[in-house]
């Protein structure tokens, strides 16, 4: 038996404890230490075998030396795989974004495309040049005010004009709006109106006043005993009445009203009434409104017209804009007028019959009703003056 000294025993025990600590298996709850980059598993295995042989020579069991060595995936492959996944995700996002942009562009093209407009048979083309306001702004206001009438408006930016395509009966209203908008631009501030005169500058000459004559012709269809309108109206004006349902017009009466106006100034009011007899009934035509003139020799008339006979027969409001001297139809209206009294039987205008008590009685007379169609033609002309004879 071999005996060791105390110092030798102490060194041998310390060596044994160190071997056990280094060679013990890694616990599950301890953090795993990553192997260094480019570790060689075969070299690690050889090192373990060499250590096991050394321990066998000292009498320590090799079971404490074996432990699992994890072989990690190389760092470069991990990074490349992560970048590739991010690229795939980015491509998918770009594809979705491209699809959404294409859908938005398609919807915009559909919404902004010019709609298929129905044809306008017998439509006319008129061109209005704006002098004091923008054609673009005027077109927006006219489209807003004209409503659903068959009118189409295009803008000619080069001449600041409006190209209007529409039915003949709607064009006068567009013309009236064009004149009004152009006149309002002069009175308004800024825009296309002339700048105010500076101190010392020559004063702008005031437009002279002129006297215009407003003529109104009252026509009725199919009545006898009146003059033919051909003696007073041009043939195209009479022919246009046929398109309005008045095939046999006759002149009931007419009126002339002189009005002094100033170009591009405020409108001047007028009022007049004219008596007439129709269907053996006394009637009168009442006119009121205002009239203005523009520098391009055009007139604008806003008129209220009424026909009365013991009460209202017909009534209308209208506006006209036309070159001075032209004829225009203000409007048409159906009318029903009570005629002369007709007795049911007997003579002297009253019917005879038996009373309740056997005496003689009288029945109420029946009134005859007459129906016709009216038309009113308006013309504004330059009033004439005559020098006295010397």
Image: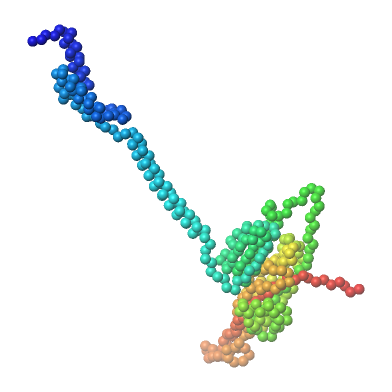
Foreground: 91 or 62?
Answer: 62
Q: Is residue 214 visible?
A: no
Residue 18 image position (x, y, % from top left): 21, 18
Farthest residue toward the left? 1
In the rendered view of the protein, which quadrant contains the N terminus?
A: top left
Farthest residue toward the bottom? 346
49 horizontally vs 90: left or right: left
Farthest residue toward the right? 390
Residue 53 image position (x, y, % from top left): 17, 22
Residue 226 image position (x, y, % from top left): 69, 83
Residue 273 image position (x, y, % from top left): 71, 73
Foreground: 10 or 387?
Answer: 10
Within the image, what quadrant is residue 58 found in? Answer: top left
Going 64% across and 61% down the picture, which residue do you hit? 156
306 horizontally vs 390: left or right: left
The image shows a total of numbered marks equal to 0
Foreground: 49 or 337?
Answer: 49
Going 52% across and 63% down the picture, which residue do you hit? 115
């Amino acid at each position: 038996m071999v005996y060791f000294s105390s110092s030798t025993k102490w060194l041998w025990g310390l060596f044994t404890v160190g071997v056990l600590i280094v060679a013990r298996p890694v616990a599950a709850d301890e953090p795993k230490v990553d192997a260094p980059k480019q570790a060689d598993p075969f070299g690690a295995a050889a090192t373990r075998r060499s250590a096991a042989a050394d321990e066998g020579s000292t009498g320590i069991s090799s079971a404490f030396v074996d432990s699992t060595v994890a072989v990690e995936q190389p760092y470069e492959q991990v990074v490349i795989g992560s970048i590739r996944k991010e690229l795939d995700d980015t491509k998918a996002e770009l594809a979705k974004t491209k699809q959404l942009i294409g859908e938005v562009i398609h919807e915009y093209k559909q919404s902004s495309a010019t709609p298929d407009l129905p044809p306008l048979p017998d439509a006319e083309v008129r061109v209005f040049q704006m002098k004091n306001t923008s054609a673009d702004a005027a077109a927006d206001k006219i489209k807003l005010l004209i409503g659903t009438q068959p009118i189409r408006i295009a803008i000619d930016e080069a001449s600041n004009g409006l190209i209007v395509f529409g039915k003949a009966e709607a064009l006068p209203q567009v013309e009236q709006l064009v004149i009004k908008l152009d006149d309002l631009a002069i009175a308004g501030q800024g825009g296309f109106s002339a700048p105010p005169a500076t101190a010392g500058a020559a004063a702008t000459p005031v437009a002279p006043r002129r006297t215009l004559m407003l003529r109104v012709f009252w026509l009725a269809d199919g009545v006898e005993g009146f003059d033919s309108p051909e003696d007073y109206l041009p043939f195209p004006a009479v022919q246009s009445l046929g398109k309005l349902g008045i095939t046999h017009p006759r002149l009931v009466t007419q009126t002339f009203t002189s009005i002094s106006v100033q170009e591009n100034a405020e409108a001047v009011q007028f009022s007049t009434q004219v008596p007439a007899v129709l269907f053996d009934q006394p009637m009168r035509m009442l006119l009121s409104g205002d009239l203005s003139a523009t520098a391009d020799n055009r007139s604008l008339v806003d008129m209220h017209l009424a026909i009365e006979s013991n009460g209202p027969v017909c009534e209308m409001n209208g506006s006209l804009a036309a070159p001075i001297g032209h004829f225009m139809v203000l409007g048409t209206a159906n009318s029903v007028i009570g005629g002369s009294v007709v007795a049911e039987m007997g003579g002297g205008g009253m019917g005879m019959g038996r009373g309740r008590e056997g005496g003689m009685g009288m029945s109420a007379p029946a009134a005859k009703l007459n129906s016709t169609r009216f038309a009113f033609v308006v013309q504004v002309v330059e009033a004439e003056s005559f020098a006295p004879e010397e």
